[in-house]
Amino acid sequence: MPLFAANLTLLFTEVPMLDRPDWAQRTGFDGVEVLFPYDHPVADWERALAGQPLALINTPPGDWASGDRGFAARPGHETAFRDSFLRAADYATRLNCPRIHVMAGVAKGPQAESTYVANLTWALAQAPDLSLVVEPLNPEDMPGYFLNDYDQAARIIDDINDPRLALQFDLWHAARLHGNPEFVWDDHKARVGHVQIAGFPSRNEPGGGGFSLPALCDAVDQLSGVWISAEYRPARGTAQGLGWLQALKSRGTPIGS
């Protein structure tokens, strides 16, 4: 059975951020991820995590309110990318987080791709003890985001050809981008380094979307070190909606279809 992480940015929002790791542990999660941990010092996170695994963080996005969504693929923003990546690497290293999602940013065209490849290559050299993942995001939720296709992501990963660079497979975005996420998985499972799940089409509790969650668990179980993270918007109180997690952990009645 794979390990399950709670995305603390979306789950347990009933309590302050630094209280959420404890809630995740008490409700059955094996660890956590957090999109942007940078509002709190590392020492505060160390106390909040209390040894609980932190599976993934994102690179800082920049000024989100102004439209920034990262810098890795943005020509002319190399300094901003390097500063943001080094900050993420510092947090990840100090919090024993093995994996960073590198945000590409809003960009398009061949120059953006060459910038992206150069920045990812540089980042891999700067953080030899960390793994990096890239995630295609659908244009409805993330307009203008450079990485918006799983085949595009696979080509870039294959071109860079570093075992520490992998694909972040998000069930929600795969369904929004390509219709059937099971086909996407079949095409790219060998490249996957991290998985995120949410219900489709509501993005609430996991289930639906054309991919059986027990089957996904079985597939992830064949991959080394890959977590499944719950990244969804709870339809009600987070703890009250965790029947899906309990069922998967007990391998009871299959959920999703």
Image: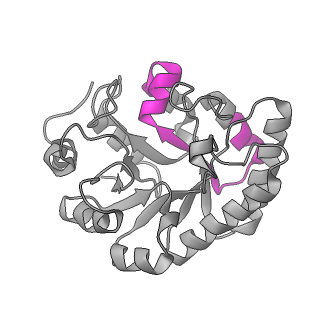
Location of residue 39 with respect to 167 vertically, above or below: below
| Colour scheme of the picture | one colour
* Quarter occupied by the C terminus: top left
Q: Determine the residue positioned at 26% across, 41% down.
A: 234
Is residue 15 shown left or right of residue 112? left
Q: Quick one: 215 or 141, which is closer to the camera?
A: 141
Q: Determine the residue positioned at 55% across, 60% down.
A: 99
Location of residue 8 with respect to 233 vertically, above or below: below
- Res. 51 in view: no
Q: Main secondary structure of the magenta part?
A: helix
Is residue 211 shown left or right of residue 137? left
Where in the figure is residue 82, as x and y percent of width and height?
Answer: 75, 61
Where in the figure is residue 78, as x and y percent of width and height?
Answer: 81, 54
Q: Determine the residue positioned at 49% across, 73% down.
A: 96
User: Does 160 lie within the magenta span?
Assistant: yes
Is residue 54 shown left or right of residue 235? right
Residue situated furthest front in the rendering: 66
Location of residue 194 with respect to 15 vertically, above or below: above
Please identify the quarter of the rendering in which residue 67 is found: top right
User: Does 112 lie within the magenta span?
Assistant: no
Q: Determine the residue positioned at 50% across, 57% down.
A: 36
Where in the figure is residue 131, as x and y percent of width and height?
Answer: 60, 60
Where in the figure is residue 233, as x and y percent of width and height?
Answer: 31, 40
Is residue 34 shown left or right of residue 155? left
- Res. 171 in view: yes
Q: Quick one: 17 or 99, which is closer to the camera?
A: 17
Residue situated furthest top in the rendering: 179
The magenta stretch is: 154-183
Q: Quick one: 223 or 38, which is closer to the camera?
A: 38
